[in-house]
Amino acid sequence: MNDPKAFNTAEQCIHERFDEIAGLFPDRVAISDGSLSLTYRELREAADKMASAILEHSGHGQENIAFLISNNGSQIITLLGILKAGKSYVALDPQWPAERNRMILADARCRLLIFDGDIDGLAAGPGETTSVMNADAWKAANELPPLQPPVPAGNNAITLYTSGSTGTPKGVMQSHRNMVHFIKRLTERFGIVPGDRIAYYLSAGFSAHALPLLGALLNGAELVISDFRTGNFLEFSRWFRESKISFAMMIPSFLRHFLAVQDKRDRYPDLRVLLLGGETLYRSDVEKARKVFRRETTLANIYASTEAYLMSSYIMEHGCLLRGNIVPAGYPAEGMELSIVDENGNPVREKQRGEIILRSRYVSEGYWHKPALQEQDFKTDPHDSRYRIFKTSDCGYYLDDGCIVHTGRSDSSIKLRGYRIDLDEIINLLLGIEEVSEAACALKKNPQGAEQLVAWAVPAKDKSIDMEYIRARLVRLLPGYMVPGHILLTKELPKNATGKADIDLLPEPVWKSDSSVQKTPAADATEEALVAIFEKALKLSPIGTGDNFLETGANSLELFVALSEVEKRFNTRIDIDTIIKTPNIRSLATHIRKIQGI
């Protein structure tokens, strides 16, 4: 007998699939947010009424409709209502700056904004016609008449705004067909069942919100909603456990915060599947997670994008042996053909890094009103027009069995002094240190305009970080040009709208030694010579005999120049291990005197 819940086709709209499920499970709880609980029958009726209110307000026709609603039942009713009205939804976020919401609202050309709270700062500007409607409007609306003609599966369903390289958000369009097929491949790979309780706490403005939202509502599962905004991970953990969540997704940086507050007794007995994605996942993340979650919990690293959603996954049952520090992105999902090419577009060899390219029938049609950018990233397959080719701007390589390892964004690669550097490689090394829970790295300009690598590290819970050890580790394991000139401790990594580290909000280094601080002068000719060498090579003055070379902010090239000069001046072999053990003028001078028998 065929399973009536099976996805037999992707040629249908999101709301059509939802209506089918509501017909199968009318009395099953569909959504709950702590104050509101609706069955599938009740949610369908509320969404129909919201669609009727929208049509009465804006008329028929395909267009973007925006909503500004916190994570709650009203948000779900609203977005389903928008889809049932034949429109596409644009999610704004009450936690985003008003100017960002305003920019998206204008760019998406939304004539209607549905809200349930404060909309200060979003008033229509000159020449704009955006009107507003309260999210409770459905309660007084009439029944929804059948749409004539029905909405085609190829119509746009969601316009998702993601950060653009120019600093202006860009809208990614996703059709009903693409999203239904996404949930089809998600369901078939991870076995979502009607009995699942799926955690929904991500901002609707973050593309990953569609995974739990549609994963639940297109399968008859319960969507358990939390408006997690406080940053209190103890509170979130309690909610997660008491809600008996069985299926969830976390980005790795969120997982690290979550794990940091766990007690050994927190085993989360109901958690069946935890998906991890959106950032590079490290072996240390998985090892820490295994200490918290039960043996039966399946962990999976997923590789996805706003333009295509689930592209591949790597499933880790208990006992899975990870061979490297980076957890693989895994093997392609159904309907997703992945390849890796070099800078010239040629296929790469095993373990050769290149850009990941996707070929699929289920790729975004492109970017909202950005034809030049769309032409850059999307192509129609010249051999079969049903397929589209998407340049992901992600980097990766193949393992010997064809498994893909995702190593970060191509825009995480920078050039410094002619060298190409992958910032994720530096972050990976920092996260491999037990005392570090989060890390970031960026290329910064000092006040003189010179570029230097800067890294930030967040101490793990109840851990202290030995900065000398960290610097020594990086110096030993990285080529000189990749060693950050500054490594800063910070209590947390500020996050942007997608939950990733916001480099612009991190503390700036102290670029130069403070000349107002009293420096310990040289005690003899050896120390005087060393001071002169290091001041010239590191471009810092004055340098005291007690100043730690590894804390001056000098880049590693300047440090090695200084070491070379020391070797010439004193005819004494000085390597990096020597500097790690004797990291200032005073101790280095003592080392040289000892070798020379002075």
Image: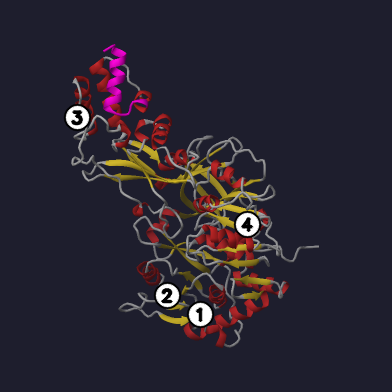
- Given this view, does label 1 or label 3 mark the residue nearer the observer? 3
Return the residue found at the far right: 1
Tell me where residue 20 appears, x and y as whole percent: 68, 72
Highlighted range, magenta: 581-598
Q: Amino acid at mark 3?
A: Pro
Secondary structure of the residue carrying tag 1 is loop
Q: Which residue is mark 1?
A: 135
Q: Which residue is mark 3?
A: 521
Q: Amino acid at mark 1?
A: Ala
Q: Which residue is mark 4?
A: 186
Q: Residue at x 21, y 27 (%)?
A: 531
Is the Cβ of the residue at disc 3 closer than 8 Å to that at disc 2?
Answer: no
Location of residue 401 with respect to 439 vertically, above or below: above
Q: Give the CA distance from mark 2 to mark 1.
A: 16 Å
Q: Which mark is residue 110?
A: 2
* Badge 2 or badge 1: first in the primary sequence: 2
* Badge 2 or badge 4: first in the primary sequence: 2
* Badge 1 or badge 4: first in the primary sequence: 1
Q: Is residue 588 magenta?
A: yes
Q: Give the CA distance from mark 1 to mark 3.
A: 70 Å
Q: Along the horizontal axis of the image, is 196 left or right of 439? A: right
Q: Within 10 angstroms of label 2, few (less than 14), some, or many (20 or more) residues? A: many
Is the Cβ of the residue at disc 1 closer than 8 Å to that at disc 4?
Answer: no
Residue 315 seen anywhere in this rendered image of the structure: yes
* Badge 1 or badge 3: first in the primary sequence: 1
